[in-house]
Amino acid sequence: IKNLFDLPDNRKGSKVVAFPGPPTIQGGDFWKSQLENIKSLMYENIGAKHSASLFAEVLGATIFDLITKELIEIGENRQIEFKETFAINTHTAKKDDELKFATLREICGFLNTNDGVLLIGVRDPKNRKGEDGAIAGIQQDGFSGDEDNYILQITNSVNSAMGLIAASLVDPKIIKLEGQNICRIECRKSSSMVYCSFSKKGQKAFGRYGSSTTEILPSELAGWAVNYKLSI
């Protein structure tokens, strides 16, 4: 961070950062705004992904401390996942259980691996065509403005598939961004193995591996539990 702000005044395109006086004479809001200024400058110079890692290391920030726009800029990784819809197939405009199951397995994967955020209403890069941007919004997912009803269908689905304890670790909320509504689902890592039971697919455990979610095979459950400090 020090190197970032020690740019010489004559460097082309550089910005000189003037640090304020002692914190004892400044209010909390002032320092919060200063931190946001520093964060913006870091994003501009070293990019969203490296800035987020640096902030996490230096300030002890977690994935939940990042605003939604920052998560989209960073992109999908071990702690971030995008889904265009929760239950509606955008091609048929009908409910699709396979899509719902895909979302539930992502949530299960976070619970069994690490804290994570799932954004519904956001296209992943491979699904952005033409002028389509990252933000699709959840209107195409049947959202009509009733936030409580939309959130309830998610929490009820998690509760039904994974149980009440798992559902208590999942916190969905509706976020307004660039004129669109998206659903931000914060998933806190579980202390015990979480299994997902959905329709006729049986009971399975899932884990996060890089930017994807995969089934934890029965032969791997014990090892996974040890590595990620989960009770079985």
Image (cartoon, rainbow, N blue to C red):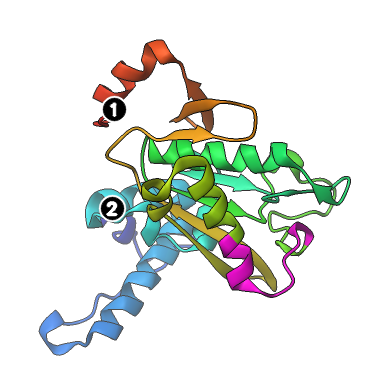
203 lies above or below 75: above
Q: Nearer the viewer, residue 11 or 22?
A: 22
* Other-residue count near label 2 (Cα within 10 Å), few / some / many at <14 / 14–19 / ≥20: few
Q: Secondary structure at mark 1?
A: loop
Magenta stretch: give its range.
140-152
Say which amino acid is labelled 2.
Answer: Asn
Q: Secondary structure at mark 2?
A: helix
**Residue at the (46%, 47%) spot, across then down:** 49
Disc 2: which residue = 3
Taking depth in this image into account, of 34 and 118 the one nearest to the observer is 118
Q: Are marks 2 and 1 in contact (CB under 8 Å)?
A: no
Residue picked out by circle 1: 232
Q: Residues within 10 Å of mark 1 (few under 14, many from 20)?
A: few
In the rendered structure, the answer to whether residue 23 lies left or right of residue 18 reads left
- Is 56 magenta? The answer is no
Asked if 66 appears above or below 197 in the picture, the reply is below
Identity of the residue drawn at 30% across and 84% down: 29
- Where in the figure is residue 170, as x and y percent of width and height? 43, 54
Does 143 appear in magenta?
yes
